[in-house]
């Protein structure tokens, strides 16, 4: 098992196909409206008038496939009044259903909205990094499903050494809040975290 599991996203390679999201739904048998991995569509741009009266545009769009980041400083864990939400010995942030009372404080605390309320069970659920697959030496379902290999996973330090430690991209929150184990190679059009130049295009989905 990994000591500090992390996800890596190559934003240039991501086509926004959402196969990762579907693979996650399938693996975890999720009901309607519960998504452990979501693909945010972020886009913006304007028309501007040139001196000669012509117009040009600077439209941009890109995708971010995000699940729980199994953060180093998980606010979800601190928000949980029953200690149901915890980080286990393998660095995976997990919900203990015997302790979860479905209060949803973890969901409100998490800036990535990663914990999801399962109304059928009255419990919170979330990405567990496909712990059972990892134990069998297999990759998480989302990583295995991505047709463009935009998603990878591994030991945080190894991914950071290979790809850098960037994860400051709009519309993600400031990474200093939770210390996400997430590494992003930004799309060429990526706006910095905090930028207001674009808008989430699929808010009903993410
Ligand atoms: S992404 Fe959210 S739910 Fe996951 S560990 Fe970080 S704070 Fe907790
Ligand atoms: S499967 Fe791969 S390419 Fe498709 S949305 Fe997910 S990360 Fe992007």
Image (spheres, grey):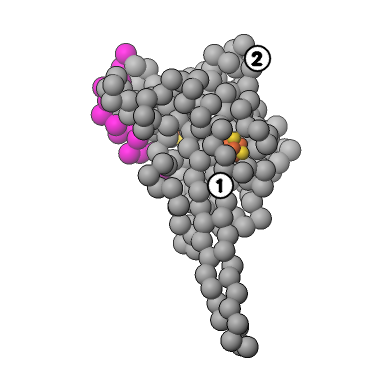
- Give residue 14's position: percent from left, percent from top: 62, 42
Q: Are marks 1 and 2 in contact (CB under 8 Å)?
A: no
- Give residue 87's position: percent from left, percent from top: 46, 24
Which quadrant of the figure contains the N terminus?
A: top right
Residue shown at 62%/11% (left/top)?
A: 136
Span highlighted in magenta in the image: 98-111
Which quadrant of the figure contains the C terminus?
A: top left
Q: Earlier in the sequence, mark 1 or mark 2?
A: 1
Q: Would residue 147 be visible to someone looking at this image?
A: yes
- Give residue 137's position: percent from left, percent from top: 65, 14
Q: Is 102 inside the magenta-drawn segment?
A: yes
Mark 1 C-beta to ligand 2 under 8 Å: yes
> Is 76 situated left or right of 23 in this image?
left
User: Could you give the CA–CA distance between mark 1 and mark 2, rounded to whole angstroms?
Assistant: 29 Å
Report the number of discs.
2
The disc placed on residue 137 is 2
Q: Would residue 71 be visible to someone looking at this image?
A: no
> Which residue does the numbered mark 1 point to in the structure image?
63
Residue shown at 28%/25% (left/top)?
A: 119
Comparing labels 1 and 2, the label whose residue is closer to the camera: 1
Magenta segment's dominant SS is loop
User: For the residue carrying disc 2, how many other residues have a C-alpha within 10 Å: few (<14), some (14-19), or many (20+)?
Assistant: few
Residue shown at 29%/19% (left/top)?
A: 121
Mark 2 C-beta to ligand 2 under 8 Å: no
Q: Is 158 inside the magenta-drawn segment?
A: no
> Dot 1 lies on which element?
strand
Residue shown at 54%/14% (left/top)?
A: 132
């Amino acid at each position: 098992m990994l000591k500090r599991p992390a996800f890596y996203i190559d934003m240039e390679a991501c086509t926004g196909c959402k196969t990762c999201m579907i693979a996650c739904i399938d693996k975890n048998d999720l009901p309607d409206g519960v998504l452990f991995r979501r693909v945010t569509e972020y886009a913006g741009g304007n028309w501007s008038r040139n001196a000669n009266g012509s117009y040009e545009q600077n439209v941009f769009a890109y995708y971010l496939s995000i699940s729980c980041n199994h953060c180093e400083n998980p606010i979800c864990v601190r928000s949980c009044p029953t200690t149901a939400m915890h980080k286990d010995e393998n660095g995976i942030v997990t919900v203990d259903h015997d302790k979860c009372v479905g209060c949803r404080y973890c969901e409100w605390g998490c800036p990535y909205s990663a914990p999801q309320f399962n109304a059928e069970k009255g419990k919170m659920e979330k990405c567990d990094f496909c712990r059972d697959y990892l134990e069998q030496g297999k990759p998480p379902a989302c990583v295995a499903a991505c047709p463009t290999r935009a998603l990878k996973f591994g030991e945080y330090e190894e991914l950071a050494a290979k790809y850098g430690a960037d994860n400051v991209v709009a519309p993600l929150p400031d990474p200093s809040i939770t210390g996400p184990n997430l590494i992003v190679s930004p799309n060429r059009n990526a706006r910095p975290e905090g930028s207001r130049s674009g808008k989430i295009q699929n808010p009903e989905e993410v």
